[in-house]
Image (tube, helix red, strand yellow):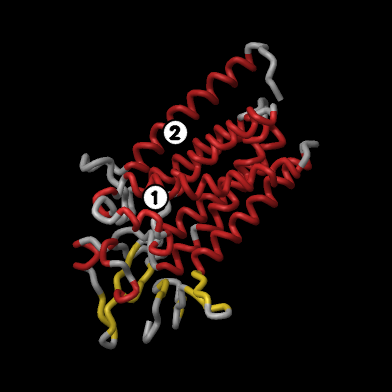
Amino acid sequence: MEGADIGFVHLGIEIHNLQNDLYIFGFRIAYYGIIIGLGMLAGIWMAQSDAKRRGQDPEIYLDFALYGIIFSIIGARLYYVVFQWDSYKNNLLEVFNLRAGGLAIYGGVIAAIITLAAFTRIRKLSFFSMADSGVLGLITGQIIGRWGNFFNCEAFGGYTDSLFAMRIRLSLVNENMLTTDVLNHKIVENGVEYIQVHPTFLYESVWNLGLLLFMLWFRHHKKFDGEMLWIYLLGYGVGRFWIEGLRTDQLIFFHTGIPVSQALSMILILAAGAILVVRHRQIEKGEEGDR
């Protein structure tokens, strides 16, 4: 780890001179933004590809993306601000400062679902049919987008010495993300201070990749429109519930000590799981699926 900025110590991986932005014609562009943008493009491609496979018009998904992306960003920001209100209540202009970070995936997902409901109602399209292709694009974007957290040195967990333990140069980390336990396990090498933590951004990216691969297989066996949506909400909810418990930067539900994303994940797990069970029982009893 001599001189490295980030390293996976038990895997022998070291990264030196980590940069989180670049300049083009004098304009600063954050790698976080670039990666989020790439995730969006990949997500649109995935959704359109699945729509084409199902005999739908892929251009409809591009039309939706123009609205969905905008409102998802707004939703992700509002979700974050609401549960970090103490950080913004005395400086409301900071709410609009996206360069300082502060987007929450669940807020974006909620906004995307609401936007899709409005879009399909106006266009007189099937919400659940579009959602089934849309969630394939959504999870694709999440797989890629999580790597923006890597360049920002954020979205990590507590101390660990597991196989995937990640060391980060302390000077690169926002002090608000540091816990007493993490600092108590601080490591000093050649005068450089490091923290050693769970790379939860990596865990979530890999979990989402596994979920996507399962969904790509399962889509050929789905019984009703909306099934892919419920599988996504169930599968992502399970992974996020586990991973959120490891993170040091949890959003807390109004001073209750309850992590918002864990609570929401549990609600989604129970709701989506119940709906899948009920719908499959209906189909087994001979009721026609709305494929």
Q: Label 1 belongs to which residue?
A: 243
> Upstream in the sequence, badge 2 or badge 1?
1
Q: Residue at x 54, y 19 (%)?
A: 278
Query: Which residue, as the protein is rendered here, is positioned at the far right?
Result: 55
State how many labels appear.
2
Q: Position of residue 139 (x, y in %)?
A: 57, 48
Q: Position of residue 230 (x, y in %)?
A: 55, 32
Q: Is residue 108 left or right of residue 84?
A: right
What is the C-alpha distance between the residues marked 2 and 1?
A: 15 Å
Q: Residue at x 68, y 49 (%)?
A: 46
**Near-viewer residue (220 or 81):** 81
Q: Secondary structure at mark 2?
A: helix
Q: Residue at x 63, y 48 (%)?
A: 66
Look at the image and tell me in which quarter the N terminus lies.
bottom left
Under mark 2, the amino acid is Leu
Q: Position of residue 108 (x, y in %)?
A: 48, 45
Q: Which circle marks residue 268 in the picture?
A: 2
Instruction: Say few, some or many: other residues with alpha carbon within 10 Å of mark 2 (under 14 / 14 to 19 / 20 or more).
Output: many
**Near-viewer residue (118 or 127):** 118
Q: Secondary structure at mark 1?
A: helix
Instruction: Name above or below for residue 156 compared with residue 191.
Output: above
Query: Which residue, as the protein is rendered here, is positioned at the far front?
Result: 93
Under mark 1, the amino acid is Ile
Instruction: Say few, some or many: other residues with alpha carbon within 10 Å of mark 1 (under 14 / 14 to 19 / 20 or more).
Output: many
Q: Residue at x 34, y 58 (%)?
A: 94
